[in-house]
Image (spheres, helix red, strand yellow):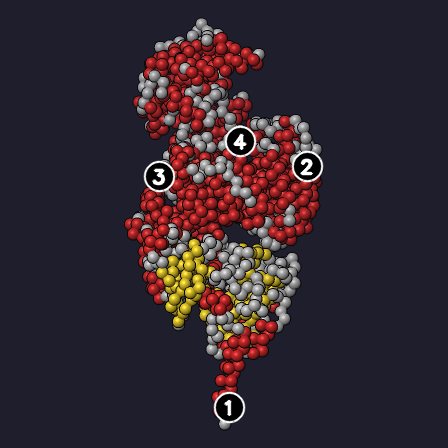
Amino acid sequence: VEPVTGEPGVINKVSSTKSFYRFDPTFLLPKMAPPTFLLPKMAPHDIRRPFKRRPISDQQKRRELSLLRQSQNRSDAHQRARNLASSVISLQSSSPDVDREMLSEAEFDDGHESESSSFDVRQASRLRGPEARKWFASQLMLPEWMIDVPDSLSQEWYVLARPAGKRCFVVSSDGTTVSRLRNGSVLHHFPSALPGGARKKGTSGPAQSYSILDCIFHESDQTYYVIDMVCWRGYSLYECTAEFRFFWLQSKLAETGACDPPSFYHKFRFSAVPFHNCDQSGLHSAYAGSLPYVKDGLLFYNKHAHYHTGNTPLVLIWKDERCSQYVIDTDNNGEVLNQQHIVLELQDDGKIVTSDDPPVPVGCLNADFVKQSGLSSGSLIRFAIGDGGLNCVDGRFEQADLQYIGVSNRARAFADSYSKIMFQFMARHSPLKVEDLASAISHENQQDKSPEVEMSD
Amino acid sequence: MEVTQLLINAQSIDGNVRKHAEESLKQFQEQNLAGFLLSLAGELASDEKPVDSRKLAGLVLKNALDAKEQHRKYELVQRWLSLDMSTKSQIRAFLLKTLSSPVPDVRSTASQVIAKVAGIELPQKQWPELIGSLLSNIHQLPAHVKQATLETLGYLCEEVSPDVVEQEHVNKILTAVVQGMNAAEGNNDVRLAATRALYMALGFAQANFNNDMERDYIMRVVCEATLSPEVKIRQAAFECLVSIASTYYDKLAHYMQDIFNITAKAVREDDESVALQAIEFWSSICDEEIDILEEYGGEFTGDSDVPCFYFTKQALPALVPLLLETLLKQEEDQDLDEGAWNIAMAGGTCLGLVARAVGDDIVPHVMPFIEEKISKPDWREREAATYAFGSILEGPSADKLMTIVNAALTFMLNALTKDPSNHVKDTTAWTLGRIFEFLHGSTIETPIITQANCQQIITVLIQTMKDAPNVAEKACGALYFLAQGYEDIGPNSPLTPFFQEIIKSLLAVAHREDATESRLRTAAYEALNEVVRCSTDETSAMVLQLVPVIMMELHNTLEGEKLSSDEREKQNELQGLLCGCLQVIIQKLGSEPTKYSFMQNADQMMVLFLRVFGCRSATAHEEAMLAIGALAYAAGPEFAKYMPEFYKYLEMGLQNFEEYQVCAVTVGVVGDICRALEDKILPYCDGIMTQLLKDLSSNQLHRSVKPPIFSCFGDIALAIGENFEKYLVYSMPMLQSAAELSAHASGADDEMTEYTNSLRNGILEAYSGIFQGFKNCPKTQFLIPHAPHILQFLDSIYMEKDMDEVVMKTAIGVLGDIADTLGSHVGGLIQQSVSSKEFLNECLSSEDHTIKEAAEWAKLAITRAISV
């Protein structure tokens, strides 16, 4: 789309600003009595009244209905933006104690709070613009990258093959279904067989019932692969373990007909991603088994983890060349870069940090450089990792050879996480291989067996 | 050049001569305004000059002082005020001298010009001797001068606001006028001029109507004038009574018996022009009482400003028979003549108002008349009875009317098919419409339309749609209300079985060759719209089938070539109706589950709308624009694909100052598009903002469009977020100055208060959108300097105590938005504001849940801003 402007450049000529629009606020007011001239008015006054006519024409009615719709939509838009803010507040309230104190000062009772937190998620599905981007980016549970193998993989973890495609939140409510990407933009707006997902007669459940699924949209077969279930029929699963959520997902999704082929009231097929206990056979099925979708790495879920928004070490992603096309980060043209690029956030004190909570410092920029380069606190900055590489101990960077590239592109909402930087670094130098995973599992099994042997003794 | 010759040439039948003269006059005016005005005034004053040139001189002079367009008028006033004193004095002297001219037309022209000058100068405290010199002459002069002077005083009162004339002068003007009206005045011209002058001076008589003696005197003189032998004087006197009925309703109790007698005599015996005014007196009384009773809310609370004196109720036993008599005086073809207005129409209209003013009480007074005449052989009696019945359906309670209406329904349906009189059928169909309008719907306990009679009613209405255009039009109207009654019917509508047939019949009516007569086609599409609006999901497939049909019709209107201007006008009207119809359908089908099938038509529909913009017609533009707004809402982000083509028409709409409705509608559609496209609207924002800022700066554009433009700023800011930054430099100062103005502008009257509140609401919506749009971005710092004056604005309007609920909700929301977006930067500032305390508390305890909700949000946001 070509940018179209009425008078090109008018707006941008800041020098001619205020004088260009000779805005006289008194024009807003009626100046004088309505005109009563040109013809002599001494003639008798017209006293005709409407005869056999509706007082309001249908045209006027259309006009008024339009205005009503517009002002309602505007008011809804404002309400949405505000609900978002309240929901961010209420979600925060569940962790840091400071906020809770602040809120109790504000006389908000807790019952109301917890109710509104799930309510607001539903509201948020109707958010738009930058608000939605920020909100959704912070709502998904984001896996850390697997840089070492966790303990008790086979006992405590599930493994599943991540479908290649767009990660999104699918929200069904009030007769419609909306899918939103991680950046908040709407992917599809469609009718579906999910609860409340289409305006269809005989749909069971109360009107306000809604569901939220964590999905990946797989382009080639136009299917939503469900990797997690966040809310179901108005019932929040945030506080449930992965074990329960996965069980619920497998049993409930199919009941609704959401896995059926597309139809008039059901535009896209849904499918639950198969998951396995992360033992040798589970790992093998996920890694090498044949699946209807293209894989993009493996996801590992800790069975006891709740649905935690943002980065979590209790869900991990791991990739290698065999199970993913995208192991090492590429540039916009899909070319693997010579050097690893990372994006870090600049803090007040000049430190450049990862997106983790708490942030992990990678280095420090001096104040003159910050000033010269026009950077400010909060800027996201792209660096290349030089030959000096990275050196870290206990989750902290001891030494990093960073080469400044510039400010990151605007589409980025966050800096890279520690685990991503490390995974990428390792992928280039000494990757964690599937064999490492398998051997960790078998090692676990031996450990498990050995006490048994002892006991049988 | 000689101005006389120019003025004569300017009236020449030879177009070239005329054009040349007009140009010379214009040139003269531009080059030497003072000389130009002076020579016109001299021409007007000179008895040696031809009457035609003098009259035109006066008219040109008047047009140099006043204009229809507000901005032009403003310029002319400024130019007059800047003339040198000696020129103005000479012109004034010429004008006053002209009042003594023997030529009546010239005197009358001068009267109007004097009033225009007075309208400009008196508020500026200039020409202080004017009223004195007019008054001092009134007794000494020959009759024709007296007549001209009274006429001048009348125009002056019309032109000037009462508060710029001292009470002493007001008293003297009224004294002179009322004396001129007195029966003792022998000259009818003088008496007529005085009576008409009083009509215009009534607004000045507030103090005098509060004084019993003075009021008695004025009322006596007015009442006597209604008995004058001269018909024009009687008519003018009744006009005064009509105006008094609405201006001084609360002062009339003492005179009502006399006035009833006078009006009854006039209605029964006088010339129709006088009788119509006499009926209008009672209609005005009813208007007043309906308003007062509406304010009471049905309960007499005693704390209303003006008490209801129940004049109508007291007059009922005599008034109703008087009005019923008039119903029998119909004109043969009144239903075919759009502009007709006669005593039967006025009487029936008044009867309808009486019914609204007194409610149930009217029924027993009218029923005997109806029962007696409804079956008479003379069509006049049948029509009068039907009209009386139709007229009293609004006002009395459903309980009171239900039995009668149920009994009458079959009779009505029968009359509609069998009565030989077009007139009776017209009124019968209209009455059926009134029955459905007031006695059919979800609020009525016992339905008039039942499963038993529904089929018959619809069959009769459909059949009647084939009758003469005026009758068919009323049948469409009846169907409109029939459908409307099922608005909230739920999933199953009794109309469903007939839906297809109704749609088919309405389309057939719209296609009748004589459909342009009696607004038949308009009525058919309006009924179609209402049927669609009130339809349920059961029939959405049929509404969907209607889409290509209406689109094809719209397409056909765009194909016509070489039409006469009359044909083109009809074509444009039809385009407007079809766009209106599509708009209704878009709103019906544009959401789930029909949205997807419906939106298949969107591309083609958009092409048609864009072609409608190619035809020059304001109504069609407005309708197409409204339809596009609805389409954008339904399409959401996908609407972006239409923007490259649509944009220029959007811009054209925003530039349409003259047809401001088009501009207003376009501004609303910009909002729709912002919400649909969100940040995808960004490439168009420079152009749109340029236009909106120009609109705001224009003194030509109707002021009613300006508040929505402010709201539109908010829509844009919310859509594009921090990208709005570059417009802040223009929009913020405008918002600030508009805010300062609107904070204290209210109070003059209800209309002004209403407008001021709409302006405040627009400004506040702009702030809301901007603050919300900037939330969580580093650029919020640009907003920090604006917080103090916005908070001050909130405080000011709170303390003015005249904001309505809408403003209250928006205002408290803005308080929250500021706190939410700027947080701790403004915590202290907010704590100091009145708004964050009294106003917030008031809103927190509001009964209106939307206000309360906004207030709770604001409280939460403030708590955060303060505690961080």
Q: Find disc 2 in the rendering and name its residue.
A: B556
Label 1: how many Cα within 10 Å (few below 14, some 14–19, many 20+): few
Say which element carries label 2.
helix
CA separation in Å, label 2 and label 1: 91 Å
Q: Is residue B758 above or below residue B240?
A: below
Q: Find disc 1 in the rendering and name its residue.
A: A453
CA separation in Å, label 4 and label 2: 37 Å
Same chain, labels 4 and 3: no
Quadrant housing the C terminus of chain B: bottom left
CA separation in Å, label 4 and label 3: 40 Å
Say which element carries label 4.
loop
Amino acid at dot 2: Asn
Q: Earlier in the sequence, mark 4 or mark 1?
A: 4
Marks 2, 1: nearer the viewer: 1
Say which element carries label 3.
helix
Q: Position of residue B139 (x, y in %)?
A: 35, 12
Viewer can see residue A201 = no
Q: Chain of mark 4?
A: A
Amino acid at dot 3: Glu
Q: Position of residue A268 (x, y in %)?
A: 62, 60
Q: What residue sits 50% from the left and 39% below the top?
A: A5
